[in-house]
Image (cartoon, rainbow, N blue to C red):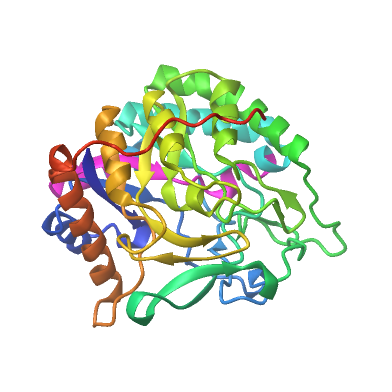
Amino acid sequence: MKIGLGLYRDSLTPENFRFARQAGATHIVAHLTNYFQGRDPSLSAGTENDGWGDCSTDELWTYEDFAGLVKTVRDNGLELAAIENLSPRFWSDVLLGGPDRQKQLEGLKQLVRDAGRAGVPCIGYNFSIAGVWGWSRGPFARGEAMSVGLDLAVIDPDLPLPDGVVWNMRYRAGRAGAEPVKVSSQELWEQLEFFLREIVPVAEEAGVMMAAHPDDPPAEALRGAARLVNRPEKYDRLMDIVDSPSNGLELCLGSLQEMPGTDEIYEHVRRFARRKRIGYIHFRNVRGKVPNYHETFVDDGDIDMAEIVRILRDEGYEGVLIPDHTPEMSCNAPWHAGKAFALGYMRALVQNAAALGPSVSRPIAVAAE
């Protein structure tokens, strides 16, 4: 197992690469969409989350972009494990089943080919309409550390999406009088199937794994749109659409634990690891479930993270773990301190995996979809 760090585009700097090395990371997961630029107040939904921003001017990433990123990361003593999330600008009609779906798919196919040629092994994506939405920030973690949480009772989960917004980002200007987006579960799965049948063969040829993130939050529906992978068994359904090593998972432990009706996630993690379809892992912890949960320090939630490492050890997982979200610590560098704590804890678990003893979880039956 390897330790990595996720960095947003503006954070892909020599200083942060040096921090990653100092904290024991060997790999980087890069978010190339600049989520925090041009935030749109119309996305707020009455919470502190004012939307990830405006991507309406994003240009399709090219071979030169990817090759430059791989070289920069390598020149700084690290390796690129994946890019995470596609700009909604690139595939809004793929998600929505719109008129430019095929044109956008051809662009995505070229993006995957260019990524593979440049040496990018994995592309994480989230096939979601509303995206990551509904959180609020507060002193939810140990010692009143600032973290994020969900309480569906204090927001309007049915608040319509503004026109021109998907995945919580504005991909084009809104049109006056446009009908709110409505997407059923059946429609969303049909759109996913179309996407996978088109993109996975290209990914196979390019040597790239397409890695799907589960829903966060894993509610039944948000903002008029069904959610996709909001139960662990739906990951199996997704992988079975195209049974290929290039059709894999961006396995978020926190999202799995947040899913209602999931008492323990351990044997789900074992099953996914056994299928050898995990692109990389978001190694984060959480307390509670939909409709009410909050994110915690990695050692302080409902998940036994040592048991997760035992399972991954037993199943021969050799991929990358990254901290994902971390509570902010009370100091002059709250983000760096939170990441350093998480990375140190993860590194200790991985370095001592052989000494952690036997796994204690037992196989469970998987409910039919």
Is residue 181 covered in magenta? no
Residue occupying the point 17% across, 41% down: 353
Q: Is residue 91 magenta?
A: yes
Examine the rendered structure and indicate whether residue 33 appears above or below residue 41.
above
Left or right of residue 331: residue 308: right
- Residue 248 visible (yes or no): yes
| Left or right: where 274 falls relative to 70 | right
Please state if 314 lies on the left or on the right of 10 as rendered: left
Give the quarter of the image for residue 352: top left
> In the picture, residue 197 is in which quadrant?
top right
Q: Quadrant of residue 194?
A: top right
Q: How many labels were placed on the picture?
A: 0
260 or 217, nearer to the observer: 260
Left or right: where 366 falls relative to 254: right
Task: State whether residue 99 appears in this view.
Answer: no
Out of 302 and 143, give the one closest to the viewer.
302
Q: Position of residue 207 (x, y in %)?
A: 37, 22
Determine the residue positioned at 54% across, 39% down: 232
**Where 16 sits versus 28, above or below?**
below
In percent of width and height, residue 181 lies at 79, 53
Q: Tell me which segment is drawn in magenta.
A: 69-93
x and y, in percent, of residue 257 in the image:
48, 51
Q: Quadrant of the N terminus?
A: top left
The residue depicted at 66 percent of the width and 41 percent of the height is 95
Q: Tell me: residue 5, above or below residue 126.
A: below
At 64% across and 42% down in the image, what residue appears? 228
Please state which of residues 287 and 159 is positioned toward the viewer in this rendering. 287
Q: Quadrant of the C terminus?
A: top right
Residue 29 at x, y percent in the picture: 32, 47
